[in-house]
Every structure is written in C-alpha cells, then in structure tokens.
Image (tube, rainbow, N blue to C red):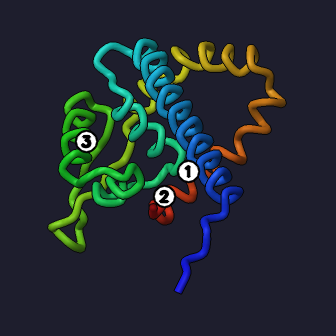
Amino acid sequence: MTTPAPNPDKAAEARSTDRLAASLFAEVLIADQLSRNLIGKALPKGMQISHFSVLNLLAHVNEERTPAQLAAAFHITRGAMTNTLARLEWAGHVHIRPDWDDARRKFVSISTAGRAARDQAIAGFMPLIAGVVRDIGADRVRGALPVLRELRLRLEADPPKP
C-alpha cells in the first residue's frame, strides 16, 4: 500500500495562510496595545479603560444590567466585573441596587456623574482617534471595518480550532 505524496501547492498555500494569519493577529494585538495606551493617557484621572468601557456600554443601552450580564458582554469573570463595579460605585459613577424579586441578584445603572465622566473621557480621546482616522482616510477605515467586525464576531461566536 502506498501513501499519496503530499500536494506541494496545498502545503505552500497552508504556509501562506499561516503567515497571513500571524501578520493579521500581530497587527491587531499591536494596534490594541497602542490604542489602549493612547486612550488610557486621555482618560480622566483615576479612570481606567475597563471603567470607561462599562460606563460606555451602560450609556449606550440606557438600561440596567446585572453584573453577570456585564461580565458576559466583556468576556470576563464575574469576579473581575465585581471589582470594576465596586470601583465605579465608589467613584459615584454607577448605582447598584438589589433585585426586588431575587435578593441574590443586583442591577447596575449609570449615574449622572458616570455619564458626565464618560462624556469627559470621550471628549479627551475623541480628537486623538479622529485624527488617526483622518490621517488614514475615512474610506480606507470604512473598508477595514467589515473585516474587523467579522473577525470579532467569529472569535466571539466560536473560538477557532487548530
């Protein structure tokens, strides 16, 4: 019994795809690090990106969320979200109330101070990120968004298998 010879075209294509994947993820990771640094420097004193992210989500949905729902939205543990929420509550940026129907659950909403802090944060970094988009070109950025969105959706839905 003989084994079929490997197809050199398929092997070359696989190596090319691997290199492309490595390049894509390297660029995404570096862009993530650099953008976090840029935004982090522009945030109001004491605010972290995780704090801003929670405030931004709550401002967008304009509804209460449970800590578990927030943790799921950010793909983090409930413990990590509890820590973030405790800091936001201490700063007066969120209100946390018990669920009157189920005492084990809580609900989180953004406070007036939290909305103001979020707006201040956006005012601090928006000129910086808008400048990057202007430099790159709005049409090129618009063209990249569907690919980045698809990448995010695929990673969210089903982490890739080797």
Across and down, in percent, residue 160 comes to 48, 60
Label 1 sits on a secondary structure element that is helix
Q: Where does label 2 land, which residue?
A: 156
Q: Where does label 3 land, which residue?
A: 85
In the picture, measured across the screen, residue 78 lies left or right of residue 146, that is: left
Give whichever of discs 3 and 2 has the lower sequence position.
Answer: 3
Label 2 sits on a secondary structure element that is helix
Residue 152's label in the rendered image is 1
Residue at 25% x, 28% y is 91
Name the residue type under label 1: Arg
| Residue 93, quarter of picture | top left
Across and down, in percent, residue 18 comes to 56, 47
Task: Report, in whole angstroms, how far the alpha carbon at label 3 lies from the one at label 2.
Answer: 23 Å
Give whichever of discs 3 and 1 has the lower sequence position.
Answer: 3
Across and down, in percent, residue 132 comes to 66, 17
Residue at 24% x, 59% y is 106
Name the residue type under label 2: Glu
Asked whether 80 or 44 is in front, the reply is 80
In the picture, measured across the screen, residue 96 lies left or right of residue 58, that is: left
Residue at 29% x, 59% y is 68
